[in-house]
Amino acid sequence: MQTPGVQPHRGAFDQDQDDAAFARAMRALLHPRRIAIVGASPKRGFANTIQRRLIDCGYEGEVFPVNPNYAEIMGLPCYPSLEAIPGGVDLAILVVPSGLVPGVLAACERAGVGAVNIITSGFAEKQEDATGPARQAAIRDFARRTGIRVVGPNCLGNISVPNRMVASSGAYPPLHRGPIALALQSGLLAYSLILPAHDRGIGFSYVVTLGNEADIDVVDMIRYYLDDEETRVIGCFVEQFRRPERLLEMAERAADLGKPIVVLKVGRSEAGRRAALAHTGSLVGADEIVDAVMRQHGIIRVFSLDEMIETLALFHSRRRPAGRGVGIAVVSGGAAGLIADLGEAVGIDFPPLAPETVAKMNAVIPPYGTVGNPLDYTGQAAQQPEILDGCLAAMAEDPNIHVVVYGQAYPALIDLEQPAGQVLRALPERYPDKVFVVLSLVAGELKHRMLDMEPVAPVGMIDGIPFLQGAENGLRALASFVRYAAFLRERAAASQAAGSAAADAERAAWARAMVQAAAGRPLVEREAKAILARYGIPVTREALATTAEEAVAAARAIGYPVALKIESPDITHKTEAGGVLLGVGDDAAVREGFARVVERARQYEPTAAIAGVLVQEMVPRGGHELILGMTQDPAFGPAVAVGLGGIFVETLKDVALAVPPIPPHEARAMLGRLRAAPVLSGQGARGQGPADLDAVVDIVVRFSQLCRDLRDDVAEIDINPLVAFRPGQGAWVVDCLIVPRAAG
């Protein structure tokens, strides 16, 4: 679906715009030397605030107010039009009524403006106004025709810290310069992200509020930030990814460069989806699929503004952990218990300390202390800093620990000249292969000094990493940090499966032809399983019989007992039609069963075309039943789901999602994410052993390639059940349904 009157979004130049043209346009947007504010006013409002911010925050270029009603604004000459400005401008900021925007855009073209930022609202976000979407489409068409890139409409402006340009409405101070760049589809949330981070000394390179994204969208901004040497961390607030395929290309580039993309995406709840639609005219896709896409492509998803700030702060680190192990030292046993509970909930691995680490700690910790991970090193360390030094050094030397966390209660600042500060300051240089983080258990700012504490030079970061604030959000940030490093390692280690490209193309063409030959009807089980078999997915042996005697011959060849299933393109759910018999054990039972399933099918659907009866081998008892399927997401295409089958499907609704292609490590991770994972490993079902997970992983990988090949031809695929036997005994597909996409 799409908003009426608005064509599907395609950036005005998209990937077709060459790098040089894109760089020129973005330089005009974020590094302009001459800025015009069209609709400038001495009265309070967006235009007035933007002009004041430019002046107060030290913009060194020229600012030109444009409004025919005034001679000067804030001491600057005011021009009646863009064309009247001598020498032209790089960037035009439009703060005029929506009905005037088309005329101002025409003036931008005549004046040779390099880029445009439209603050004005009243476009596609106004669902009740039928003309709004059309006006927004006209902005897109203008950008595409002229080559003048446009941010907005319905946004709050942009910030370029390297250019000292705060061209955004809001009470911003001059911001710290740093490695974080933001692209936000909500302008008002910019305050909630920027100001708390700024107060902690966290710096930014760029902040762009995108609004309705008539032209420039979040993917364009990611592209620019990836090319910017100063930017090392990218943060996005997103309601909808308008160009999902292009987003994934940018995610691959980001992974190549080691630049993390941190995304806060709304739309998880039905209310959130409605709010996103009301705000931008966007439609939000299935959130579970969004999760899977982000995870597989190394995009770090966060779920609150507080978590986003802590995650952006932690990714200041130029180091990446070499493993998943986190060690944390706190001064309280209660805090250690709290950290352990919260860490487990967010997926942090606190590995047991190595025996040599325990010995080192026991040598320095008082007898009433307890050695563990998390570690309570006792309050005695306040008087004896050698306790803290010995404990943190021992953790850093532990081969199972890759991130060392110093947990403090409050405040969030440390005087590095004090003994504890000296210990912390020395650690990164002593142990360059480990990451060191300071985590305050609560968030806040020091408003007073404790009686026995006189900090000389309090700081809020160590080794370039701002101190994390708040136990839960800090631990969530740590979990994302560790997972991202693991993603980069797995990505680097992954090798493409060797195979013949020609053979793969031939197989894909054959499968597409099979689907297309069905002329829009669901493929019968035998046809669907033939496609699976062509992809190397094990299926049950079977044969189609058109008479009872043919059924007997097939059963003898397969071996008793067998299953009998009606085959009809008009009967999708064979069991509901009474068209399935299991455990048929001899010739007589096959003859009687053949007649019975045909008769039941005719009673269920008198007009159905009956092709015959499928005679199928019976799967041995004792296996684990799984489901494996594919559905189509309107944004990201095919998504693969795997979960435990049988009664667990309806009662638990326990499935894991991923998008093709699915490499083996991701297929195994999908099975591990299931709540029923212990059942498959043999730990959660009495009397039932483990499943052959290697066989299931191989099937998921092959199935994902099939889904990728048929993405344009198939609406859904349902394998149910996939039966997995004991390790080494394999897994078989028992039944499969393939539904083609509707024509058009």
Image (cartoon, helix red, strand yellow):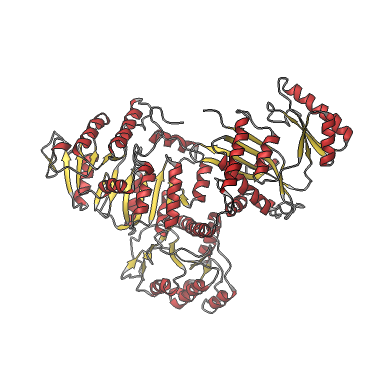
Q: Is residue 312 above or below residue 268?
A: below
x then y, percent, for residue 577: 73, 27
- 20 or 575: nearer the viewer: 20
Instruction: Report whether residue 676 is seen.
Output: no
- 152 or 250: nearer the viewer: 250
Drawn side of residue 641 relative to residue 168, left or right: right
x then y, percent, for residue 407: 46, 65
Which residue is pictured at 55% across the width and 67% down the height? 373
- 189 or 155: nearer the viewer: 155
Q: Could you say which quadrant of the image residue 565 lies in?
A: top right
Q: Total marks drawn?
A: 0
x then y, percent, for residue 667: 60, 51
Q: Is residue 731 above or below residue 130?
A: below
Q: Is residue 669 above or below residue 626?
A: below
Q: Could you say which quadrant of the image residue 740 lies in?
A: top right
Which residue is pictured at 20% across the width and 45% down the height? 35
In this view, the residue farthest toward the top is: 607
Instruction: Report whether residue 22 is seen.
Output: yes
x then y, percent, for residue 574: 72, 31
